[in-house]
Image: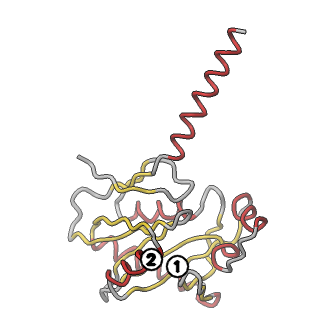
């Protein structure tokens, strides 16, 4: 009986630690002193994040990654959701432009979204914009417009899987901006944390 209590207590403790870990927001840690600092943003849509980067024309470009069937085509039934979670599926890369930060902030307000802002090196941001635009343009012939999200989406070479979803893709993009990400990133639950 004594061993059963120890095992039960241990299982409860491990489960509590695991749940706290997965529900604690992942921390985006921006670079400490970026060269020619420029603001970038992460839009947290609940289950899905999007990265907002400035381009050379002063516009803001939203980039998003997801499952083609579920995210691009809006086929969001139970079987579509399970397929996106449990088996490798066709990935999609989405893009949307905003003229300025005020236009983006208006969308955030209207849709009650979370907008995280921080600074990175301007050269890194522009380099990532160029790389994502090239990646987007490689499959431009598959382009569709999604009126629900406002995104233009194309099929992507990167398969969408439970272990490489929109949050994992965002982390890869953030790392290219010299950011670090700490914590569990299975779903969109981010915060910005600065090093002391």
What's the CA distance linking mark 1 and mark 2?
A: 6 Å
The residue depicted at 73 percent of the width and 58 percent of the height is: 86
The percent position of residue 161, horizontal first and vertical second, equals 66, 61
Q: Are marks 1 and 2 in contact (CB under 8 Å)?
A: yes
The local secondary structure at tag 1 comes to helix
Mark 2 Cα-neighbour bin, 10 Å: few <14, some 14–19, many ≥20: few
Q: Spot the residue most to the top.
A: 2
Can you identify the residue that label 1 sits on? Answer: 135
Closer to the camera in the image, 134 or 143 = 143
The percent position of residue 24, horizontal first and vertical second, equals 47, 46
The percent position of residue 181, horizontal first and vertical second, equals 42, 53
Q: Image check: 165 left or right of 122?
A: right
Can you tell which mark lies on residue 69? Answer: none
The local secondary structure at tag 2 comes to helix
Query: How many numbered markers are drawn?
Result: 2
Closer to the camera in the image, 87 or 138 = 87
Quarter occupied by residue 138: bottom right
Q: Is residue 103 above or below residue 184?
A: below
Q: Image check: 8 left or right of 28?
A: right
The residue depicted at 68 percent of the width and 80 percent of the height is: 73
The residue depicted at 56 percent of the width and 34 percent of the height is: 16
Q: Image check: 89 left or right of 112?
A: right
Q: Image check: 193 left or right of 12?
A: left
The residue depicted at 23 percent of the width and 69 percent of the height is: 37
Q: Is residue 81 above or below residue 11?
A: below
Can you identify the residue that label 2 sits on? Answer: 131
Q: Spot the residue most to the right.
A: 79
- Quadrant for the N terminus, please: top right
Q: Is residue 151 above or below residue 176?
A: below
The percent position of residue 85, horizontal first and vertical second, equals 69, 60
Mark 1 Cα-neighbour bin, 10 Å: few <14, some 14–19, many ≥20: some
């Amino acid at each position: 009986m004594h061993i059963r209590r120890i095992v039960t207590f241990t299982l409860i403790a491990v489960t509590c630690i695991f749940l706290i870990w997965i529900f604690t927001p992942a921390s985006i840690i921006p670079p400490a002193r970026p060269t020619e600092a420029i603001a970038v943003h992460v839009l947290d849509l609940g289950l899905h994040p999007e990265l907002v980067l400035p381009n050379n024309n002063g516009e803001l470009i939203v980039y998003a990654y997801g499952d083609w069937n579920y995210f691009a085509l809006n086929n969001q039934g139970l079987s579509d959701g399970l397929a996106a979670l449990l088996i490798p599926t066709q990935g999609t890369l989405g893009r949307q432009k905003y003229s300025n930060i005020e236009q983006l902030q208006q969308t955030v307000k209207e849709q009650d979204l979370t907008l995280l802002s921080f600074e990175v090196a301007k050269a890194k941001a522009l380099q990532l914009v160029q790389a994502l635009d090239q990646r987007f343009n490689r499959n431009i012939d598959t382009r569709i417009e999604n009126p629900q999200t406002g995104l233009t989406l194309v099929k992507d070479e990167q398969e969408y899987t439970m272990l490489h979803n929109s949050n994992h893709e965002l982390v890869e993009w953030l790392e290219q901006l010299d950011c670090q990400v700490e914590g569990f990133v299975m779903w969109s639950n981010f915060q910005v944390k600065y090093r002391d």
